[in-house]
Image (spheres, rainbow, N blue to C red):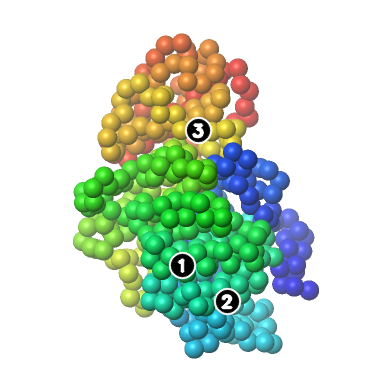
Amino acid sequence: MPVLSVVLLLIAACGMPAATGRLTVSSNKRYLQRADGTPFFWLADTAWLLFQKLNREETERYLENRRAKGYNVVQAVVLSFGPVQNVYGAAPLVDGDPARPAITPGNDPKIPGQYDYWDHIDWVIDRAAAKDIYIAIVPAWGSVIKRGQVNETNAAAYAGFLAKRYRDRPNIIWMNGGDLQGDVQGATWEMLGRTLRETDPRHLITFHPFGRTQSSTWFQNAPWLDFNMFQSGHRRYDQDPTPNAKGEDNWRYVLEDWARTPPKPTLDGEPSYEGIPQGLHDPKQPRWKDHDARRYAYWAVFAGACGHTYGNNAVMQSSRPGDKPAYGSNAYWYDAIDDAGAGQMRHLQELMLSRPYFDRVHAPDAVASGSGPRYEHIIATRGRDYMFVYTYTGKPFSLRPGVISGKRLRAAWFDPRTGAKRPIGVVANDAPQHFTPPGAAGPGNDWVLILDDESARRRE
């Protein structure tokens, strides 16, 4: 019996959740959904070197931690910028040739030390499926493409191997790209994308681009690209000197992608990582905190993103004792998985799924006063009879009436740190309303105002 079938039988016997299978784009082309039509809010963690650096016991610990925190996607690289073999000493390729995967017939994928590189990836994917976690597989990191190891000549063979091996796994998402512009070795990216689509038409495909760029710049019309991804990156406002730079305003990428045709979902696949130096390369710089991670998440999602990816400096590189860590990492992955921001992302997911999901839109007309540039930007998202308004600084603001239905609106403050609600009461919907968030105003005192048509009955 195939390993996956055994895993799924064990899941059923134990009453554990299993990945429901195929993900698709919603009918309005803006969001993702599960096979049964229910919303799929992408909540990903970044573990680029998961396949290479963690053994099975460590992988189980990592995946269970992420499952418990609400993550449903993990982003990981096959041919990475890091080790050329996994923790068990198995290499992925014969003589480094992507057209010749190093497969060892007869190995037992259930016994540590008795399986090859690909057997171990199989096991990781199956363990993730047992926890209702999808693996967003990056076939080859941008540096591998840039130096020509994966190229036009061998890309089809390599992508075909991957697609054939994993097209029957229920919990796969293909993430072409890997921190490189789409016009650098563009023909290779196109070949990878086309081959994945032709060989595996059932799984979604996106593209992970270079920092401060978006996949839609190059691949909006590519038939293989199901949804867009942008990388808002790790720089502060003052660290990006390019003309018309978005800086930390990741919500602006979402609005740009929504303005493009054909319509496709979009999300921030790499915002500033918690614990990484601001600007990325200088360890002496201040480090991004949990409140920064929250800001990126709420800004992007409220602008219309179909979910969000969180990252942590130590976790994304599986930093451990004995490593020479990149980007000034000063923690180990097994401690950093419990950093504050990692546990706070699920509150956004739960909030977004607590109301009708697919008709949700950005509501720029809702805020009458109080919004400003940069950190003072206030952003609103709404359905027909509800609205969420996010403020990063907790300064007072006013809303226009009549943006959602109802003569009277139930109001509450939602705490992004804990997911707790503080009822405000009922307010009229026929005149501007002024709101003052709890606490002292300032960056990091972030809150979400929840407004509901009083006549709408919801289960809280």
User: Looking at the image, is mark 3 or mark 1 nearer the viewer?
Assistant: 1
Quickly name the residue at label 1: 187
Give the residue type that dot 1 points to: Ala
Q: Secondary structure at mark 2?
A: helix
Residue at image point 40% right, 18% down: 400
Quickly name the residue at label 2: 157
Q: Position of residue 184 (x, y in %)?
A: 38, 66
Q: Nearer the viewer, residue 305 or 441?
A: 305
Label 3 or label 1, whichever comes before in sequence order:
1
- If the image is split into quadrants, where does the N terminus sit? bottom right
Give yes or no for contact between labels 3 and 2 (Cβ–Cβ under 8 Å).
no
Label 1 or label 2, whichever comes before in sequence order:
2
Q: Secondary structure at mark 3?
A: strand
| Residue 66 horizontal side relative to residue 27, left or right | left
Quarter of the image where one finds residue 199: bottom right
User: Looking at the image, is mark 3 or mark 2 nearer the viewer?
Assistant: 2
| Pointer 2 local density, CA inside 10 Å: few below 14, some 14–19, many at least 20 | some
Q: Position of residue 215 (x, y in %)?
A: 44, 54
Quickly name the residue at label 3: 361
Can you say whether 176 is above or below 264 in the image?
below
Give the residue type that dot 3 points to: Val
Quarter of the image where one finds residue 389: top left
Give the residue type that dot 2 points to: Ala
Q: Secondary structure at mark 1?
A: helix
Label 3 or label 2, whichever comes before in sequence order:
2
| Residue 83 horizontal side relative to residue 166, left or right | left
Residue at image point 31% right, 29% down: 371
How many numbered badges does the structure rendering display?
3
